Image (cartoon, rainbow, N blue to C red):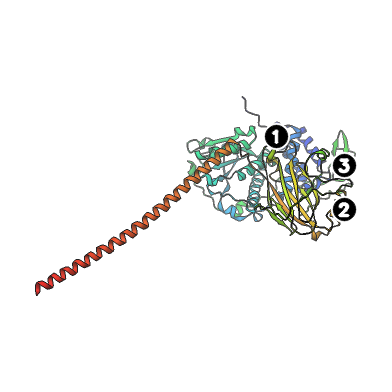
Amino acid sequence: MPEPVIYSVDDISDADADTLRQKILQRVQQDDLKDLVDPVDLRRIRTDPLWCKRFMAHGDNVMDQAFKFMVDSLKFRKEMNVNALTLQSVDQALFKKGVMAAHGRDKAGCAVVIFSARLHERVSGAQFEEVKKFLVFWLEKMEREEKGKRITMFFDMGNAGLSNVDIPFISYLINLFKFYYPDLLNAIMVFELPFIMNAAWKIVKNMLPAKSHQLIKFVSKKDVTTLIPQSCALKRWGGEDDWTYTFDPAACAMPPNPFLSDQPDGPEVSKVNGEPVEVNGVSNGHPGRKASNARKRTSLKTSNLHDFHSIRESPSTASEPGPKVHFGDEISTSSDDLSGKMPSDSTSAELGGMLQVTPGDEVWFGTGSSGVKRTVTLVNIRGAPVAFKVKTTSPEKFRVRPSSGVVGTGHRQTVELQLCDGVTAQHVITDRFLVVAAPVAHERVPARDMARLWRSLPSDDKQELCLRCSAAPSLNDPMVVMVRGLGTKLEAVTSQLEKQQQLLSRAEQQYASARGRLAAALAALAAMAAINIALAFSAGQC
């Protein structure tokens, strides 16, 4: 079976790239997206001729795929504030450890980014958010330094063990290449993968698109120089380079953005179905020309608020079972009586003394019917009615029922979060939900009045809680089962070693005690012998 084709920018025509560019410029003017795109990226669309080609190559030269990739990437870059990333905005400790560094080039001339697995430690929660920013920083830095040319990821697995395996970390890194940094990956080199980690790596491999499997190269000291020149291969890899990583702030700094030309960021005219249309608030009857009296484009507003947007229910959800917001004159009364019971989930979080939210920090999506649908439970702990609403960074990916309502006194509300058709868990790892709560006076509020109610509430009364989205591999996946089995066996061996160590320690203590008693007995015998000798000597003299 032939390997899938991997396109490059050389395979993309200027006409296709320009078509994608015009489609994107039209799309970002729509109300649901215009505030989700960084003005810097909007300028880059116009000034970087290769960016659209890279997205076309990444989408296998299929316009719709490239368009979706580009929209998702633009939203991701705004959400992560990529254009504002600096060395100072990322946890310095991550750089000082040397987990990731760029050094040398492979035989294809691509820059090599080294991931030293033995130095990596698994983290979670807020610390993992810093790790995500660290990874985005490195890819953005390399893209700028290489001016969009491909790079090679070198996974140095030497001396690494199961404690260094971090599937969420690798999954996030792969998804950065897969969804947000188009046509940037040249190859993945895996150096000296321990046998015990083969199963874990198969899980990682399955996260990559099928066409990318041919980019993975497993190497050792015997053959690493077939891919990396001897002079660039480190000595611990079997090469000649004696380089060792040291943290240099100047070398790790984010370089200036090379994709923005000096041309003024003025209005642009696009065509739809052959007709000139307005872009950035300026219309022009001559496609491709700038109007002589056109004003300079006003930058999109950059807000420091979360880019969350209210969920809009699709018409098809009205007839589906489960809790929902009732429209018309119906009342939102789908919450259940708690009878004084409180959830005991350890991941719960308190929201402004009004609601107990479960889970409290992270929503895990997986595969299968149970993985694409998750729930969030809201429990009223205020002793009075509390209004709530659930917002998300990507309304087109999720179906939320109900998206707003009132949780009555002593009641709870279950909110269902479901992935839309065609959306997988890997597509939402950068998305978030925002739960907003505020005290209200009435328990029964018509659904049609909820929007007006929220507009009337003081801003100081509104409390927010952010929930991250994460992707979990299927627990029934044979590879996951194997890795979990290895982990269980490792724990069992470790437990046995600890028991043996305890027995050895006890034996040493008993030996020391016995040796002490023996020494005391010998000393007593010696003393008695000395006394007998002295008595015998005295009797002889008499």
The residue tagged 1 is 57
Is disc 3 surrounded by few (<14), some (14 to 19) or many (20+) residues within 10 Å? some
Q: Position of residue 167 (x, y in %)?
A: 60, 43
Residues marked 3 and 1 touching at CB (< 8 Å): no
Q: Is residue 311 left or right of residue 540?
A: right
Element assignment for label 2: helix
Is disc 2 surrounded by few (<14), some (14 to 19) or many (20+) residues within 10 Å? few
- Alpha carbon separation for disc pair 3 and 1: 29 Å
The residue tagged 2 is 452
Compared to residue 7, the image places residue 429 above or below, namely below
Labels 1 and 2: the sequence-earlier one: 1
Amino acid bearing label 1: Ala
Residues marked 1 and 2 touching at CB (< 8 Å): no
Q: Quarter-wise, where is residue 143 in the image? A: top right
- Alpha carbon separation for disc pair 1 and 2: 47 Å
Specify whether residue 215 is in view: yes
Element assignment for label 1: helix
Residues marked 2 and 3 touching at CB (< 8 Å): no
Element assignment for label 3: loop
> Which numbered tag is attached to residue 344?
none
Taking the spot 12% from the left edge, 71% from the top edge, the residue there is 537
> Which numbered tag is attached to residue 278?
3
Q: Quadrant of the C terminus?
A: bottom left
Compared to residue 344, the image places residue 180 above or below, namely above
Specify whether residue 157 is in view: no
Q: Quarter-wise, where is residue 387 in the image? A: bottom right
Nearer to us of marks 2 and 3 is 2
Nearer to us of marks 1 and 2 is 2
**Front residue of 438 and 186:** 438
Q: Position of residue 528 (x, y in %)?
A: 21, 67
